[in-house]
Image (tube, rainbow, N blue to C red):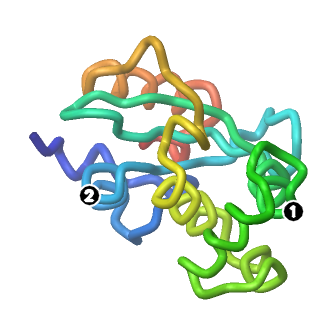
Amino acid sequence: MRTNARSFRSHKWVGPDRDLQTSLFDYDLVMVQKPDRDYEDEWFVVYQIGKNLFGTSFIREKELDDLIDGREWANEKDIQSFLRSVDSTKEQWKDVYVVMKLMELISYWGQENILGSDYYPKTIKQLLRLSENLAKKYGEEYRL
């Protein structure tokens, strides 16, 4: 089920596609940096976990880079295999835009390994309510 495209008009949200609806429903994620984030590189991520069910998570770009630098749970063999799969060196991969980094990591290792488990998935209605709350708190450009 698609939602009204008018609901996806933000200037702050980003995704792997320019069209946020395509990003969320076809590529399974969109993300935004909130003004009151704890870290400069922190992102709030909304991702599709099932048919019309969505999870939310926070992730830092540093966490993504640390994973590829071997400072997280992946071992060097896994990291090299990942880098071959995306045809990149560590240095090249670190220069990629954060949305694509996240997409590539999820594609290789899966949502749960990268974003964790969401025990309270949201419906489209709940997601739109979340969007309304973000718009009220931060401004219309934070509406999904």
Q: Amino acid at mark 1?
A: Asp
Which of the image's four quarters has the C terminus? top left
User: At numbered mark 2, what does the secondary structure look like: helix, strand or loop?
Assistant: loop
Question: Residue 28 or 11: which is nearer the viewer?
Answer: 28
Which of the image's four quarters has the N terminus? top left
Pointer 2: residues within 10 angstroms few (<14), some, or many (20+)?
A: few
In-image side of 7 versus 45 (left or right): left
User: At numbered mark 1, what does the secondary structure look like: helix, strand or loop?
Assistant: loop
Residue 71 location, x and y as percent? Answer: 90, 50
Residue 141 location, x and y as percent? Answer: 53, 48
Question: Residue 8 or 14: which is nearer the viewer?
Answer: 14
Decide: is 141 above or below 19: above
Give the number of the disc on residue 132. none
Give the number of the disc on residue 26. 2
Residue 114 location, x and y as percent? Answer: 61, 43
Decide: is 92 above or below 48: below
Residue in view at x 88 percent, y 41 percent: 39
**Camera-side mark, 2 or 1:** 1
In-image side of 52 versus 97 (left or right): left
Residue 54, quarter of the rendered image: top left
Residue 91 location, x and y as percent? Answer: 84, 82
Extreme residue in the top direction: 120
**To which residue does mark 1 refer?**
69
Pointer 1: residues within 10 angstroms few (<14), some, or many (20+)?
A: some
In-image side of 53 versus 35 (left or right): left
Residue in view at x 34 percent, y 28 percent: 128
Question: Residue 85 or 143: which is nearer the viewer?
Answer: 85
Extreme residue in the left direction: 1
Residue in view at x 49 percent, y 21 percent: 118
